[in-house]
């Protein structure tokens, strides 16, 4: 049976029929339908689509259609076990035969999956790249190919193939061999984050030069971006969670394992249920903590960036960074783990001078080639420009990915426009002070001593080096220590000052001369006042329907309690049963018939059959 014979039935195309009957959604979003039709017909594709925009449907629906047409199984290459488990659980709930092969399976379980695969009982098989490249797996693929039962290769998180990207994984480099061995099997490569360098790498390394490219908007209007200057970061984080996300699920990213553990302990002691996650924990502890985060409501996961790729939890309402990410791609990927269900989420970050210094030092001291270092510095500069921006965060973020947009009215700068001041003269004073240090026997000092000299503080160190006699001593007494740190941070971010060596001593770069001559203007933002809840609520307007209130809120609470019990009984995360948005629609609409319940987005035929009677009875009891 060919794909062409699966065309419109009763005026509904085959892809749309699968979307409605299996997944329970009334219509495709954006270019999803074009992608599905293109891949279902046996053509290659590169898909760049933001997290939460429905990338998985772009290969899951073609997999179902091609399996029905007799083409066999779709292989999904995925980098993380957690993603495979979640996807397979969700597909099982929908009645789609799916399985995974990974290290979490016992030998007899893996053999059972292989038998089901060869017997044609599986529509989608998930596997990690390192397993796909083994000799045993190659033999398995060869056997399927001989029977004409390889329908599609889907390579998820395709940016991992690029050495220029933010999450390079060497094992991805071998995936080009799939096309060399099975050139007639169509392929789809998908990622949420890739700049021009990374896109070019994906196309070349996966041999997808002739693939059709689908690049959708990177905009996530349901995410509100907020970046604040570090003061007491843990206290700032606690205030943010307690005032804006009390009782809600979120992810907090930290740079070091030690900071992860300390932050999780701090939040827990302050009454915010939090769990730590990093690669230093035993595998069992990581698994337990991750499962709790996925299955329980209102938990906060504090983690290094080792956590999160492939996490499909739709009710993450905030993603916080206590340290500066390496680049905008990493920041975008990590913040995209909030609001996957389309509901409002916050991307909150705090950063300071030490973040800028540490990131620059890590690049400078790495053993990478100079071309790679140069690119990484440029990527860091773009992130720092986003952090220091006075204008719309979203416009800046989209511009990085080559997309234009109007001010969003929803980020911190739009909601509370920062007051700026001309820091050019202050910058010249600071640079002059560093120059005077160097003139005095080539000495170099760190930020603390520099600021003490500028502000005219007579410390032991000032006395030791006789810096009270410098012409720059006390010329910055009119500015606070925090303001001077901001000026220095800006100058390092702009590349006019470098922090060098183990003690982060400061040195001028060639471009500092232009600032000293007054040829470059330095504008600084004044720290904004704390944003009010009312102002924050205004920024969310128009993103989604307001949450249920009154009787609808009571119905929603009972639906969530039913979902939690059902999820525990089936041993799956709650969102695999139904997403929050689907339950909220049920609570508002109060469907009284199977037909009305089936019309709600997210209720497919399988879930209607499995849960319809229980839900209708629960809602009827509320009337």
Image (tube, rainbow, N blue to C red):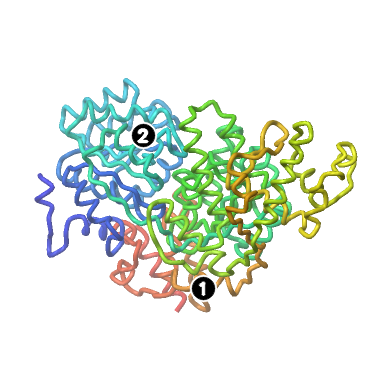
The residue beneath circle 1 is 553
The image shows residue 194 at horizontal and vertical percentages of: 39, 44
Which residue occupies the foreground of this view, 168 or 527? 527
Q: Which of the image's four quarters has the N terminus?
A: top left
Q: Nearer the viewer, mark 1 or mark 2?
A: 2
Give the structural element (helix, strand or loop) at label 2. Answer: strand
**Circles 1, 2 touching at the beta carbon (< 8 Å):** no
Above or below, comparing residue 275 to residue 423 in the picture: above
In what quadrant of the picture does the C terminus appear? bottom left
Residue at position x 44%, y 69% in the image: 543
Q: Quadrant of residue 115?
A: top left
Which residue carries the number 2 mark?
127
- Is label 1 in a helix, a strand or a loop? helix
Q: Earlier in the sequence, mark 1 or mark 2?
A: 2
- Residue 591 location, x and y as percent? 36, 73
Q: Is residue 51 above or below residue 536?
A: above
Label for residue 9? none
Kindly identify the residue that appears in the image at 53 percent across and 74 percent down: 538
Kindly report the distance in space between the C-alpha atoms of the residues bearing marks 1 and 2.
41 Å
The percent coordinates of residue 445 (x first, y second) are 76, 38
Q: Residue at x 34, y 27 (%)?
A: 174
Local crowd size for mark 1, using a 10 Å CA cut-off: few (<14), some (14–19), many (≥20): some
Out of 367 and 172, give the one closest to the viewer: 367
Identity of the residue furthest to the top in this view: 135
Can see residue 253?
yes
Q: Position of residue 484 (x, y in %)?
A: 72, 53
């Amino acid at each position: 049976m060919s794909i062409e014979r699966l065309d419109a039935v009763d005026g509904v195309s085959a892809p749309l029929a699968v979307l409605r009957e299996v997944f329970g959604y009334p219509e495709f979003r954006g270019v999803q339908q074009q992608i599905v039709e293109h891949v279902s017909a046996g053509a290659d594709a590169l898909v760049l689509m933001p997290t939460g925009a429905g990338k998985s449907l772009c290969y899951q629906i073609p997999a179902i259609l091609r399996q029905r047409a007799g083409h066999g199984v779709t292989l999904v290459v995925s980098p993380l076990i957690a993603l495979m488990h979640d996807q397979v659980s969700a597909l099982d709930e929908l009645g789609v035969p799916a399985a995974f092969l990974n290290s979490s399976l016992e030998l007899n379980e893996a053999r059972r999956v292989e038998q089901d695969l060869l017997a044609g009982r599986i529509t989608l098989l998930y596997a990690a790249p390192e397993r796909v490249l083994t000799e045993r797996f190659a033999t398995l693929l060869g056997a399927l190919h001989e029977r004409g039962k390889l329908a599609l290769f889907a390579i998820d998180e395709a940016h991992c193939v690029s050495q220029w990207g933010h999450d390079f994984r060497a094992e991805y480099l071998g995936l080009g061999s799939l096309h060399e061995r099975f050139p007639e099997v169509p392929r789809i490569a998908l990622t949420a984050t890739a700049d021009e360098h990374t896109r070019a790498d994906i196309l070349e390394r996966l041999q997808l030069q002739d693939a059709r490219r689908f690049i959708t908007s990177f905009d996530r209007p349901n995410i509100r971006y907020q970046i604040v200057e570090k003061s007491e970061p843990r206290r700032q984080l606690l205030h943010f969670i307690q005032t804006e996300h009390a009782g809600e699920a979120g992810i907090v990213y930290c740079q070091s394992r030690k900071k992860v553990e300390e932050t999780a302990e701090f939040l827990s002691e302050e009454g915010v249920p939090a769990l730590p996650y990093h690669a230093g924990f035993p595998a069992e502890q990581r698994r337990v903590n991750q499962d709790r985060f996925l299955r329980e409501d209102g938990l906060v996961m504090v983690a290094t960036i080792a956590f999160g790729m492939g996490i499909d939890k739709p009710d993450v309402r905030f993603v916080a960074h206590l340290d500066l990410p390496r680049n905008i791609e990493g920041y975008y990927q990590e913040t995209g783990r909030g609001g996957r269900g389309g509901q409002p989420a916050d991307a909150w970050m705090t950063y300071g001078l030490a973040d800028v210094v540490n990131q620059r030092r890590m690049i400078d001291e790495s053993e990478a080639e100079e071309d790679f270092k140069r690119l990484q510095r440029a990527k860091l500069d773009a992130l720092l420009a986003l952090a220091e921006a006075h204008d719309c965060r979203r416009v800046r973020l989209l511009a990085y990915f080559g997309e234009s947009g109007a001010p969003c009215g929803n980020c911190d700068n739009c909601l509370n426009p920062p007051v700026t001041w001309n820091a050019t003269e202050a910058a010249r004073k600071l640079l002059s002070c560093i120059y005077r240090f160097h003139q005095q026997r080539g000495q170099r000092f760190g930020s603390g001593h520099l600021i003490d000299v500028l502000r005219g503080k007579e410390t032991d160190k000032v006395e030791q080096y006789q810096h009270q006699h410098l012409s720059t001593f006390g010329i910055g007494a009119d500015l606070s220590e925090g303001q001077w740190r901001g000026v220095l941070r800006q100058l390092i971010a702009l590349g006019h000052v470098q922090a060098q060596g183990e003690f982060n001593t400061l040195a001028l770069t060639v471009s500092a001369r232009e600032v000293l001559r007054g040829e470059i203007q330095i504008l600084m933002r004044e720290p904004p006042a704390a944003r009010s809840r009312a102002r924050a609520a205004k920024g969310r307007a128009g993103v989604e329907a307001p949450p249920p209130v009154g009787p609808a809120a009571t119905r929603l609470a009972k639906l969530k309690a039913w979902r939690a019990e059902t999820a525990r009984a089936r041993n799956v995360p709650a969102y695999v049963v139904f997403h929050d948005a689907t339950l909220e629609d049920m609570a508002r609409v109060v469907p009284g018939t199977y037909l009305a319940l089936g019309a709600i987005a997210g209720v497919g035929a399988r879930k209607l059959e499995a849960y319809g009677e229980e839900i209708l009875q629960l809602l009827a009891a509320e009337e």
